[in-house]
Image (spheres, rainbow, N blue to C red):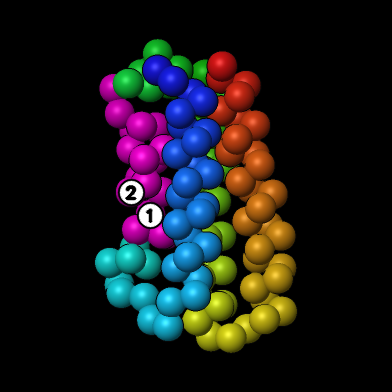
Amino acid sequence: MDLELEITNHIRWIDSLASLLDSEELTEETFNAISEHDKCALGQWLMSKDSKSLQGLPEFEKLIESHKLFHELAAEMVEAVQLNQETDVMVLQTQFIEESRKVIDNLRRLK
């Protein structure tokens, strides 16, 4: 298993989210893909048999928690952008970036 690839996948997902934030309207399907932690490449890997050797490790459990929260914050941020709630967007963006760092840190700890 290539944890560096999973870090790259995570960063690519953030890039794709950034491009979606400029969209005038998001479909429900797209919003679900943002909010559901098991829809992205990293989330699918976390739930797959490929990560089985790491499952049960405290670091792995922390990764799952931070990844879920990361997606929750992403969804909240998208909603705030859509509603033009600039103050909320700024607060959520800070939390989102911090949680993203935790995801990457947890992946690196697993290496």
Is residue 47 rendered magenta in the image? yes
Q: Which residues are magenta?
A: 33-49
Mark 1 residue type: Glu
Give residue 36's mark: 1
Residue 105: which quarter of the image? top right
Q: Looking at the picture, how far across and down is residue 98, in whole percent?
A: 69, 49
Q: Looking at the picture, how far across and down is residue 83, in whole percent?
A: 53, 85
- Quick check: 81 left or right of 47? right
Q: Looking at the picture, how far across and down is residue 30, in whole percent?
A: 33, 66
Is residue 29 visible in the rendered image? The answer is: yes
Q: Quadrant of the C terminus?
A: top right
Q: For the residues marked 1 and 2, what is the alpha-carbon distance in whole angstroms?
A: 6 Å
- Quick check: 28 left or right of 16? left
Residue situated furthest top in the rendering: 53
Badge 1: few (under 14), some or many (20 or more) residues near its Cα, within 10 Å?
some
The number of discs equals 2
- Identify the residue at horizontal 52%, vertical 52% (top origin): 14
- Identify the residue at horizontal 48%, vertical 65% (top origin): 19
Is residue 72 visible in the rendered image? The answer is: no
Mark 2 residue type: Lys
Q: Looking at the picture, how far across and down is residue 3, in whole percent?
A: 49, 23
Is residue 84 rendered magenta in the image? no
Q: Quadrant of the N terminus?
A: top left
Give residue 65's mark: none
- Quick check: 43 left or right of 63? left
Badge 2 marks a residue whose secondary structure is loop
- Identify the residue at horizontal 46%, vertical 49% (top origin): 13
Instruction: Kindly identify which residue carries mark 2.
Output: 39
Mark 1–mark 2 CB contact (< 8 Å): yes
Badge 2: few (under 14), some or many (20 or more) residues near its Cα, within 10 Å?
some
Badge 1 marks a residue whose secondary structure is loop
